[in-house]
Image: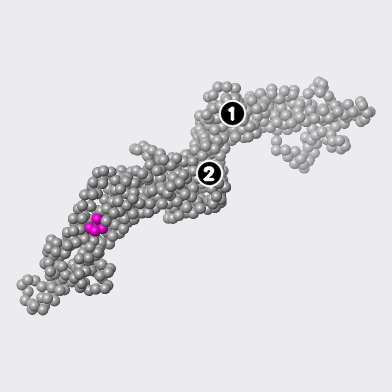
Amino acid sequence: QSGRVDEACRLASDCGQAWRGLTWLGGRPLSADGKRGNPRRLLWKNQCRAISGKMTRLAGAESGRAGGGGGDRTLYPSLAYEAAILSLLADDAESSLSNPALSTWEAALHALLRSELGIIEEDVLRAHNGGRLDRLAASGGHFPFPGTEADAGFDRDVRGHDGDLGAALGRLASCPAGEEGSDPLRNGMVSFLVGEGAVEEYIRDLAGVALETGDEDGGGLLRFAVHLAVYADSALPGCVSRMGPPDSSGDGDDGPSDVSLLELLLLKYVAVLSGRRDLWPQVALYCSLLPYGDAAVGTYARFLLRVHSERERRVAIDAARRHLGPDMELDALRSAVREVVAGDDGGADCARMAGEDLPPAGLSLHAARMMRSVGWLCLRPEHAPDALEWANALLRRLVLTSDDDGAHCGGRVFFAPKFFVDRMLPAGLAEDAVEECEGREQERGGDDEDDAEPLAAGSVSLSFALNLQAEFASIEAFLGAHTRYELFLDTVSKTSPCHESDRLLADGDAASLAEREIASRMERNTFRQRKMGLVRIVVESASAAADALTEVLAGTGGWLVDEPGESAAAADGEDPAPRLDELAIMRERFLPRAVFMLHEVLDSTAEWLEQAVRDTVGQFGREDAEDMLLTLFASFDPADRSSRGPAADAGALPALLTSSPAAPGHWHKKALSLASVVANDGNALHETFSMEEMERFLSLMAGSHVSLMRCGDRGFLFDG
């Protein structure tokens, strides 16, 4: 069976049985020079068939008696092996299939294939011999070589099964190895020997069984069915891809179908592979065999949702690029991210997947899953534009659901988008995306749009990338400003504007006038220094929050306003309307909110400073308190701190009441200036206000104007 006939002959010769080796070589045809081969080949083959048949019957009888004793015998009599050799060499399929030594389906298949080879060999020799006889009659040439004289009408056919290969193949089903023909592998070999129709019927039946068993046997039968179907469809184009599902009716060609049998097998096997973590690197290969690109992309995208660790994600992306190609790899990543970010959160049914990490504290499972999905696009620099596009899409969703976010996170509004920006996204993502798009524009000849190569569907243009960069910066600025706002509120709530003075001398203490003057001065200086420290804490926190919020409101062109352009609002081929609608909703919802937040910072700071003024006046009286506070105000005013002594110029004092950050009037003045910011057409802020919000804003401006008039008056401020 292994073809090592020469080695077997040498072994027989070394054992002193050279005659046995020569017997095995009797089937070789005589060469043209008559020096090699058997001149009596026909006689040799007939004798071998007769001997092997008799020996097989004897071996079968002896084997039956040995098996009837209840023993578990693993070897057959030597007679069986001798008969097997002769029957195989003589192309005697009848004896081979009856020989107990050839009881496996592989051995039986080998016997049939050798018999088929014998048919071909005999046909060639007969044709050759017939040609020689014709030439002999025409030219008086040489007689045929001995052993090749037989013609097709010879009464004893030496082909092993009377020339009827189909009848011999039918014998395979009753071979002792097949358990009444139930072995699918053996039956598959039979179908390939019979012909294409049998192959199609076998694959259909096998696929039905494999799809039902699935991974019950570790996916072994399904694996075999998939590989066989792929091979058959490549060897016989359309053999499997034109078949419908196993339950379809027809004669093997089911015509058009939504899912072909080949696709159904591949999808089922990919599902089995997706459930085996050790086989994940193979998923991309079988997805690439799917007959349609969309099916391959969608199937691989669904698989990607199962992969959570960064190492395994890199392996999956490398496999996708190797088997699917860069374009389909990116399409699969986009589809996977879209499925998570734009899909439903599943509500209470959202459960952890196998291998998925717990969400960080304060985040829902779905929010964490959406953030991690964007990480798919952050693993390769060429995917940076798509990563930025989907990062912005997720940020818009998280910001717009900020109220729900705050409810889940104990009142920490915007916690999820802040966590996403600070912890999940790589630094410099927006800049990397623009740089990648600039490189693409140079490669495709972007200087002349008419001559440039068209963008692939779904690609991010340079103009769109610039808008995405500005959008990301705007949202990041708003979230940063909100953080500053929360820190300010925390600072104001924890920093009291009032504190007791440290009295150096009690009222009843005996001390001279000079000693009391010195003690009083030291007490005022200590109080002022302590008050200055508290004021500095509040003023610095308020300034940081006010500057951050002002940056959001007074940004060039307006917050979340795109630069105009057909390709600047969405990726190529995508509908820009959903994104533009979300940006408009965010402007209407959060710009008025940012204005009110800024006014709250300014007004609360002024109120805190007024309390500090009243606390000082209450403990030291108007005259001493005024001197202390003006010195305090001057120390915070850059123009006054270095050029003049504290409150030295009486004419400069009115301006100091509104120019020094330590003075309440300074913050009321900044609050009143919000009217100019909102009215500026370049920022388009007033367009986002509703009627109720505008009335509230105008009321706040009126109150700020009154407060500024009150705190800008020296007498009124210190007299209370």
Asked whether the viewer can see residue 89, the reply is: yes
What residue sits right under mark 2 in the picture?
A: 456
The magenta region covers 668-672
Task: Look at the image and say whether residue 671 sits in the magenta stretch.
Answer: yes
Residue type at tag 2: Ala
- SS for callout 2: loop
Image quadrant where residue 713 sits: bottom left
- SS for callout 1: loop
What residue sits right under mark 1 in the picture?
A: 242
Which residue corresponds to the image point at 50% horizontal and 45% vertical from the top-left?
459
**Residue 60 to residue 671: above or below:** above
**Residue 703 to residue 177: above or below:** below
Q: Identify which residue, 408 or 630, lies in the foreground.
A: 630
Which residue corresponds to the image point at 37% horizontal and 39% vertical from the top-left?
345
The main secondary structure of the magenta stretch is helix
Task: Look at the image and say whether residue 403 sits in the magenta stretch.
Answer: no
Q: Is residue 520 left or right of residue 689?
A: left
